[in-house]
Amino acid sequence: MELETIQWYPGHMVKARKMIKENLKLVDIAVELLDARIPISSRNPEINSIVGDKPRIIVLNKADLADQAQTEKWKEFFQKEEGLRCIPVDSQSGKGISNLLHAAQEEGAGVLQKLAAKGRRPRPIRLMMLGIPNVGKSLLINRLAGRGSVRTGDRPGVTRGKQWIRVGKELELLDTPGILWPKFEDPEVGFRLAVTGAIKDEIINVEQVTVKLIQLLTKIAPEKLRTRYKLETLDEDAYETLRKIGLKRGCLISGGNVDTLKTAAIVLNEFREGKIGLFTLDRR
Ligand SMILES: Nc1nc2c(ncn2[C@@H]2O[C@H](COP(=O)(O)OP(=O)(O)OP(=O)(O)O)[C@@H](O)[C@H]2O)c(=O)[nH]1
Ligand SMILES: [Mg+2]
């Protein structure tokens, strides 16, 4: 089964990109959130032209779902190759949040110094959260704020407008809608964005994407796949494996056939939740 080309760049993202560019003038630091499972595929190729020379911090979010050794390697990559601060974060548990606060304070100190030199009063450091849909921008803001200030959700496209959140006297955070870019040059990027949940399920073929995921897992982590679904062996044909998983899970339609679409949705969700294992798909 060939995977159909995946593309998602609706009008609201075009609008959001414009809003982001306009509001960058107002902030001190751009926080670029990448998905720790796919640090390269989740990176907007237009990011440099969007952010320009604004100070930037990279957050590798959802680090709890990624391969820890790989996350360390990616952190080193962004620090060494790009000279950027890079902080792995798990916004669900709050792990890494204090490191991010520390980095923001260090980066912000220069801004405050400049204000003081001009005889101006200190003001909160302003951070803008940037990233693909569903990467965790809003949850990260709630973690930094220590309260549920903005809406989050386990699907892409939850945040639609901009929203400022004040944290104490020191920080102001700007939440932005997740954006993608007009074309994924490499179809593999579309696949990785889809399996990790950055692309709306309504516009992908869930069954195809999951079959490709099973193909991949059969290659890179057969034991994990076998264990999770209590399969004795794995088939060469990933679709057949999907069918067997459906049988194990009792996903049947009338006539005793396997409901492969429902089974695919289950496998895809379990992968996204880390239940099959912790994977970094972009390898360093
Ligand atoms: N396991 C895990 N889940 C996370 C993490 N950060 C966010 N999530 C979950 O990912 C989903 C998306 O989080 P949001 O904060 O709404 O994502 P967003 O980037 O604001 O998404 P949009 O507003 O759609 O652009 C939610 O279900 C969060 O609970 C994390 O570090 N680890
Ligand atoms: Mg959001």
Image (spheres, rainbow, N blue to C red):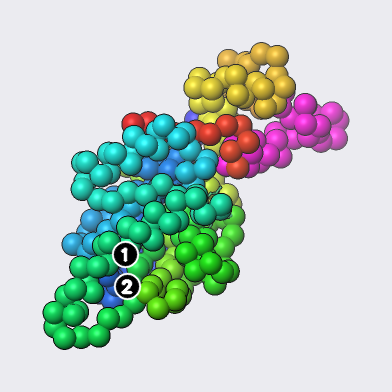
Between the C-alphas of marks 2 and 1, the distance is 8 Å
Q: Is residue 144 above or below residue 113?
A: above
How many C-alpha atoms fall within 10 Å of the one at disc 2: few (<14), some, or many (≥20)? Answer: many
The residue at which mark 2 appears reads as 125
Residue at image position (51%, 62%) is 143
Q: Main secondary structure of the magenta part?
A: helix
Give the answer, above or below, for where 191 lies relative to 222: below
Quarter of the picture containing the C terminus is top left
Percent position (x, y) of residue 262? 71, 39
The numbered disc on residue 30 is none
Q: First in sequence: mark 2 or mark 1?
A: 1
From the viewer's side, name the closer residue of 7 and 232: 232
The kind of secondary structure element at disc 2 is strand
In the image, is 210 to the left or to the right of 191? right
Residue 18 at least partly seen: no
**Residue in the picture at 20% in, 86% down:** 120
Q: x and y percent of residue 125 in the render?
A: 32, 73
Secondary-structure class at tag 1: helix
Amino acid identity at mark 1: Gln
| Residue 81 part of the magenta-drawn span | no
Spot occupied by residue 129 in the image (x, y as percentages of width and height): 39, 63
Residue 251 magenta: yes
Task: Pick whichever, 62 or 199, lies toward us.
Answer: 62
- Badge 1 local density, few (<14 within 10 Å), some, or many (20+)? some
Bounds of the magenta segment:
244-272
Q: Residue at x 21, y 41 (%)?
A: 81
For mark 1, what is the residue?
105
At 62% from the left and 16% from the top, the residue drawn is 235
Is disc 2 in contact with disc 1, using a CB cutoff of under 8 Å? Answer: yes
Q: Is mark 2 within 8 Å of ligand 1?
A: no
- The residue lying toward the viewer, choosing from 2 and 80, is 80
